[in-house]
Each structure stands twice: as structure tokens, then as C-alpha cells.
Amino acid sequence: MIPEPALRPAGSRGPGLERCHRSRIFLDQGDLVVRTRTRSLRRPVGENGIARAVFVDAGGDDMERMGPTIPGSWGEVQLQDRDGALIGWFDIEDWLPESPALVKRSVQGEQALRRTGAADLFRSAGVPVHIVRDRNDPRVAPRTRAGRGTALGPGKSFPAWYWNTRAVAGGVWFATITVIILSGSTAPWLVLLSAVAALVAPTARLALRAWTRRRLKRCAPVVRERVKPAPADELGATVRFCRDTELRVQDSDLVLRELGGQEYWFPLTGPHALTALVLVRDRTGAPLGAELRGPGDQVRVVLPWGPWFAGEGGTDGWSRLRRSAGLSVSERSLTGKGTWPKPALGSRPLPQSGREARAMSRFPGTVAGASSTAVMAVGSFFSLTLGARIEDSHPGAGGAAILMGALGAVLQALPYGIHQLRSRLWLDRPVTPAGRQPLTERTA
């Protein structure tokens, strides 16, 4: 059992979902422990180790690329020794569960430290925290070659073996294609080596899917209550929404799982745990939804009433959530010109279109984005064309290259095609009352 307060990672899905199960930062026998799915780091706390923390409450620059922009850091927490030398560091949003669903730096300063649990963690460790808002502040330790410190993030979404496989295969493919293009050579061994290297990428992606399923099956936390949505009929909720969205009350966490498989884990124990479940009513007294709040009355999650509790069985689901979560339950009504909900995790549980739902639920891609898919397609194309060019003079090598090129194209297109077909023909269609899954399940 991990002692509280313990920091939980940002919400994730696919290969990165394992981080939600395993990655934590906590105190153990006077040491600060950073646990990821691949390692555990221990750093002593006190005069001979971590003596202070500096929160650099300043945003980092966004990174432009082909595809969506990669947002910069929300702020950096540095762990320093008594002389101010850097021991370790982490980006604050990496340990804020709801950060993927929020606008960059919508949570800042002391609020960010409290939401993540870092404020309580450092208080328990007796480590003073300094908040600065300028990266050039003298209390900020520079990351020099001699003193870069250790990155204390929750780990990468994709496993190292996948990156290494793609990097080696990509390097071999690029080298062989460069030789072929520049020299004009169509030596059979070069063509075959290029085709094999091109086939590795789509094969590795399929292997990653299987690896992800196998790893997640090993993660089996005790679930005390599982609450499925009970949407109102007029909302047109889909089969995918009713099947995949849920709230789980576990031994020490409350987990929100969204339609795309993204999970957000919030503590139920410790000083930074969720504290209250608040039913929000409009000015006429009709329920609008519920809020899950943490210390300081901060709204962490909102549950709109229509998608979650307005349909058949919704009252039962609401009662089970109230009983199982162990939170204080209260009500409040809107006054004045206030609107609800404000931007927060869970405020828009239903996608606007089937296209959006398919994009949300597709197996996640790497940081390379669309360029990775484009490179795989180009690799298969070269295998086909080069194989056809040498097929007359070297039928064995040419046929093998064509086969590998065609197989690579199929392996790349097949998962996408299956996802599109299942979504359009079944998952993104409105659910019928008779086809709904049980709204609540209890696991002993």
C-alpha cells in the first residue's frame, strides 16, 4: 500500500494508461520515491538530500510540428539540495490528473501544488517550497551539462522497446533508400533490406497493441463500485458512450473513464483527496449535474446530469455513487446569472459528432503525429516499386519485396479500417434502451 499523500500522473489512455496504475511520487522511510512502470528512484530528504523545492510557475514555449501543436510546460518543480544544486525536476502538469482536459496553465501557483498533492507531500517531508514566476530568478537552478538533475516524470506513454525498434528500423530504411536513390543501384540485397526495414514499423505498431492489452490485463485494482452512465433518451447517446464511459470507486482512488478510453485517477485518501460530492440545481430546482470537489472547494470533475443520471436507472446510479465514494454530500443552487458547468474535466462527456468520437477513441499515436504514418506509407510504396523493378531479373527478391510492401500496407490500413467500420456500423450509432448495458455493477 502506497502511503499518502502520493502524486498521481496526468490522465492517459492506450500504452500510457499503465502509468495511472503504477506511477506515483510518495514518501517512504525518509526518502522521496518516484515509481514508474519501469523503475523506482529514491532520493533522501533532509540536509544530505532534498532540502528545498522551487516551483517555477511560468509556462514553457509550445512546439510546432506537422499536426497538432505540442503545448509547453505549465511550470516546473525543482528539487534542490541545501546549496541550491539541482537533484531532480518534473513538469507540474505531468502529475495533475485532469491536465489533459484543461486549457494550458488554467491551474497555476499554489492551486497547482495543492491539486497535484505536491504541497502536502513537501509539507509532510518538511521541505520548504518557494514559488517563483520568472525562470531567471536566482533561486532557479540551471540545467547545466554537469548538473541537469534527474527527470522525475511518470514515464513515457510508449515503451522503450517500441521507440528503439522504430528508430533502428527507420535508420536502416533511410540508409538503404538513400544508397539506392543516390547510386541508382537495385542490388537485390539492398531492396530486400529496405523492404524488411519498412515492414518493421507497421508490425511493431500491431505488436504494441497486443503488448498494451497484455500489460493492462495484469493491472487489476479492487473495484468497490462501477457506475455506468444513464443518459436521457433525447441526448442521442451512442453505444460507445454507454459502453466505455464509467466511474470506478476503487480502494484508494476514484477513476473517471471517458469515451475515448482516457482515465483520470483521483485520490480518495490523504490530505489532497476528493472531499465532497455536490449536487447542483438550477433556479427551478431541477438537477444540472454533480461536482467532485477537493480541498479548498476546488472543482476537480463535473458530471452533467443529462448524460449521467437522467435516464432509466440513473437514480440508482446516483445513489450508489453517493454511498460508495465516502464523500460528504451536499446540494447547491445557481443564483444570479451564473452558468454551469464552468470549463472542467467532464463538462462535455458527449462528442459533437461521430467523427470526433472516432478520433477520440482511435489507438493513440506517437509525438511524431501524422509524419510517422506518412513515413510508413512511403516505405510500403518504395518496397512495391523497387520489387516490381527487379522482379524480372531477380524474381525471388522482387516477389519478396512486393509481398512485404503489400503486407506493410495492409497491416497499416487494417486497424484503421476495422476501427472505422465498427464505429460507423455499431459503436457511433444511438443506443436503444433495450441495448444498454447494466448501469451499475459492484465488484466484491
Image: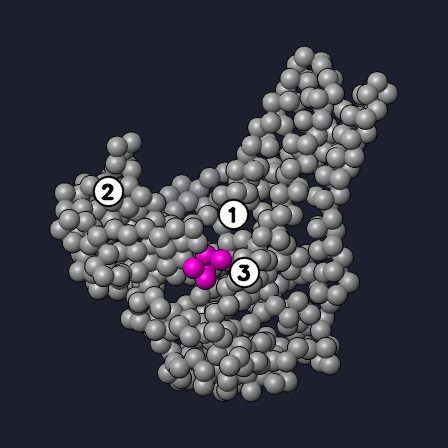
Residue in front for this viewpoint, 141 or 30: 30
Determine contact: label 1, label 2, CB under 8 Å.
no
Residue 422: mark in rendering? none
Q: Return the x and y of residue 9 as percentages of the image width and height.
A: 41, 58
Regarding mark 1 in the picture, which secondary structure is present there?
Answer: loop
Q: Amino acid at mark 2?
A: Leu
Residue that badge 1 annotates: 158
Residue closest to the far right: 392
Looking at the rendered image, the disc whose residue lies closer to the viewer, 1 or 2, is: 1
Q: Residue furthest top?
A: 183
Q: Position of residue 131 (x, y in %)?
A: 23, 52
Residue 289's place in the image compared with 84, above or below, is below
Q: Check disc 1: other Cα within 10 Å, few if <14, some if 14-19, many if 20+.
A: some
> Relative to residue 99, is residue 139 drawn left or right?
left
Q: CA distance from mark 1 to mark 3?
A: 13 Å
Nearer the N terminus, badge 1 or badge 2?
2
Which range is magenta?
18-22
| Residue 136, horizontal then vertical, whole percent | 24, 39
Pointer 2: what residue? 86
Question: Is disc 1 in contact with disc 3, using a CB cutoff of under 8 Å?
Answer: no
Q: Residue at x 54, y 81 (%)?
A: 442
Q: Looking at the picture, which amino acid does disc 3 mark?
A: Leu
- Looking at the rendered image, the quarter that the N terminus falls into is bottom left
Residue 228 sits in quarter: bottom right
- Which residue, given by chain and number where applicable, does mark 3 sit on? 216
**Overall secondary structure of the magenta section:** helix
Query: In the structure shown, which secondary structural element does the residue marked by tag 2 occupy?
Result: strand
Q: Position of residue 105 (x, y in %)?
A: 38, 53
